Image: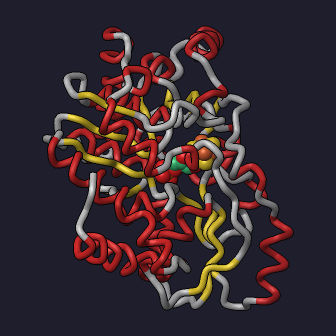
Amino acid sequence: MDFSKAKLEAETDRLQLKLSALGWSREACLMIAPLTLQINLLKKEKNAIILAHSYQTPDIIYGVADFTGDSYALSLQASKTSADTIIFAGVRFMAQTAKILNPHKRVFLPSLDAGCSLADGITADDVRMLKRKHPGVPTVCYINTSAEVKAECDVCCTSANAERIIRALPEREIIFVPDAFMAKNLEAKTGKRLISWNATCIVHSGFDRRKIQQLRRFFPSLAVLAHSECPPEVAQEADMVGGTADMEKYVSSSNSESFLLLTECGLSDRLRAEFPSKRFVGSCSLCPYMKRNSLPLILRLLEDEPAKNEISIDADVARRARLCLERMFELSQDG
Ligand code: 13P
Ligand code: SF4
């Protein structure tokens, strides 16, 4: 597809508005302009939308995404869309969630390698074994799980509503899978006993409390925000523990000058673009799965609609997993 010089210049101006805060040069924006123009045209033609998780690269978020957010906001958005096709710029379990909520729409994942160490860390058989071992105990699964695992569980949760959902259940003992660290952090917050699994996130498990202590010496007013997937000893050092949307809210309303976000660096990039006057310190931790998606892969999806990238889920699994997600919306009062 060829675009006029004027069109390319206008698209470059649009991209530069956000991307320059992240160090993108005009030349770099001009280079991706033909891609973003083609993707946005094809989206309209096909009545498709792109949902992007906050960990995606800024060219996806500011170039082509129709909606960006945390896994909870994206699942709500997926449940409300009138588009015929959803392209999920995120990881597989997120695209599966969109498909479960939209059985009659087409859902695509740009990269086949966009997995997740938490979702890959537990199977439906593992959950059935836990339920046999603890009969009558309710089962909560983190949204970072496969459709098959959700189908075995009573209620789903995300980092944005996990505490609320654990508190809403009357039982004091709950099976919570698969994140061992998140379970410990939730036990500390709710005082309930959570029977968990041994999976962890390869990004968040790597954060170290000594790094926080070192940085606090250099930046005395530093606000430390930890994702609930961080190890408990890291969460204990933080000023706030929660999900990516909680971090965004905290940064937008805080008077602190500097922030350390203990999460994937896509969120720091995004907040740097949204709040250019605030300072984000610390090194970057990439999720190799989230970063598999790219503008060229998204364009190929829209052009060719490859069958291997389309999400399909067994009808009975999808029906049972949907009940688990609907219970989450009910308990989060968004149902
Ligand atoms: P959020 O639900 O906070 O967006 O987190 C998703 C995720 O994969 C964190 O690693
Ligand atoms: Fe999964 Fe961790 Fe990547 Fe989130 S950051 S998608 S939990 S591996």
Q: Is the residue 148 above or below the residue 52 in the image?
A: above
Q: Is residue 200 left or right of residue 209?
A: left
Corner quadrant of residue 297: top left
Q: How is the image coloured?
A: secondary structure
Q: Is the residue 137 above or below the residue 279 in the image?
A: above
Q: Is residue 206 left or right of residue 281?
A: right
Which one is in front, 245 or 7? Answer: 7
Q: Is the residue 177 above or below the residue 191 in the image?
A: above
* Ligand 2 found in image quarter: top right
Which one is in front, 57 or 294? Answer: 294
Q: Residue at x 52, y 30 (%)?
A: 112
Q: Is residue 322 left or right of residue 246?
A: left
Corner quadrant of residue 76: top left
Residue 187 visible in the current orientation = no
Q: How many marks?
A: 0
Q: Residue at x 51, y 80 (%)?
A: 25
Q: Is the residue 75 above or below the residue 29 in the image?
A: above
Q: Position of residue 153 (x, y in %)?
A: 46, 22
Q: Position of residue 30 (x, y in %)?
A: 41, 72
Q: Residue at x 42, y 35 (%)?
A: 109
Which one is in front, 157 or 133? Answer: 157
Q: Position of residue 318 (x, y in %)?
A: 34, 17
Q: Is residue 98 left or right of residue 220?
A: left
Q: Position of residue 319 (x, y in %)?
A: 30, 16
Q: Which quadrant: the C terminus? A: top left
Residue 28 visible in the current orientation = yes
